[in-house]
């Protein structure tokens, strides 16, 4: 009986995972001519000899950006924001346009770069701020942010549980890099932004 239950749970988990998988997503590089491995995960991840220079990097296999970024600044922005770190620095290791997509597995002389609107460059002043601590104190000071420790994220827990990484707002707070499912017509979001639902999870407007 236990084996039947375990099998059922496993199949259910596989079904849930298959609904949102990197296969076929914008980050599935297995069919790119610059990825001669034919593998999906290897461009970003490796089980051996991973790069540990970025705190919290998940078995990282891609060259990490060394860019100095001009970050978001506003008179109404009450958080302290430094250079992008953690997960956001990993995202920018392709999306700042200075590191080639094919710079992985120790390679540093790649020639294929992110282009168009996916290339954010190193000037992030017109992008949502990232890599800042988002806590209840900030929410109280700002007055137009929901308290992350108690506000429902819509994903099963609180903002702090489900959207923050190490207590910080990062790229992956809003974007699921492995997601092939179009949420409200847009891929790579952690939840639907219909009627600004994703934005209003944190912003009390």
Image (cartoon, helix red, strand yellow):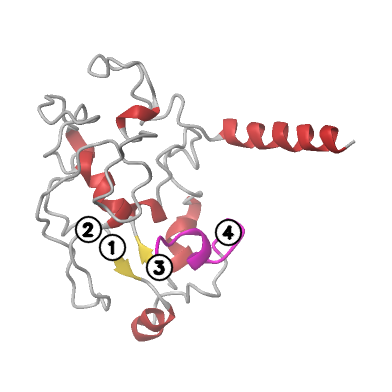
**Separation of marks 4 and 2 at Cα, in angstroms:** 26 Å
Closer to the chain start, of discs 4 and 1, is 1
* Region of the chain picked out in magenta, as a range: 153-167
User: How many numbered callouts?
Assistant: 4
Q: Are marks 2 and 1 in contact (CB under 8 Å)?
A: yes
Closer to the chain start, of discs 3 and 4, is 4
Q: Identify the residue at image location x=16%, y=25%.
A: 112
Please give left or right for residue 2 compared with residue 149 in the image. right
Q: Identify the residue at image location x=36%, y=80%.
A: 138
Does 67 appear in magenta? no
Marker disc for residue 167: 3
Secondary element under disc 2, as helix, strand or loop, is: loop
Which numbered mark, 4 or 2, is in the foreground of this view? 2
Q: Which residue in the protein does label 2 denote?
A: 84
Marker disc for residue 131: 1
Relative to 118, is 86 above or below? below
Q: Which residue in the protein does label 4 denote?
A: 154
């Amino acid at each position: 009986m236990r084996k039947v239950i375990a099998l059922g749970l496993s199949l259910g988990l596989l079904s849930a995972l298959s609904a949102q998988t990197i296969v076929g997503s914008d980050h599935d590089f297995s069919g790119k001519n610059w990825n001669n491995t034919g593998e999906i995960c290897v461009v970003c991840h490796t089980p051996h000899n991973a790069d540990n220079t970025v705190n919290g990097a998940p078995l990282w296999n891609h060259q990490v950006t060394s860019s100095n970024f001009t970050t978001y600044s506003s008179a109404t922005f009450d958080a302290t924001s430094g250079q992008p770190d953690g997960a956001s620095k990993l995202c920018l290791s392709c999306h700042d346009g200075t590191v080639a997509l094919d710079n992985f597995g120790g390679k540093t002389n790649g020639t294929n770069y992110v282009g168009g609107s996916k290339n954010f460059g190193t000037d992030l002043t017109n992008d949502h701020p990232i890599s800042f601590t988002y806590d209840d104190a900030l929410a109280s000071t700002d007055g137009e942010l929901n308290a992350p420790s108690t506000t429902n994220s819509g994903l099963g827990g609180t903002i702090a549980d489900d959207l923050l990484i190490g207590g910080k707002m990062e790229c992956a707070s809003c974007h699921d890099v492995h997601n092939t499912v179009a949420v409200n017509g847009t891929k790579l979001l952690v939840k639907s932004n219909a009627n600004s639902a994703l934005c209003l999870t944190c912003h009390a407007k």
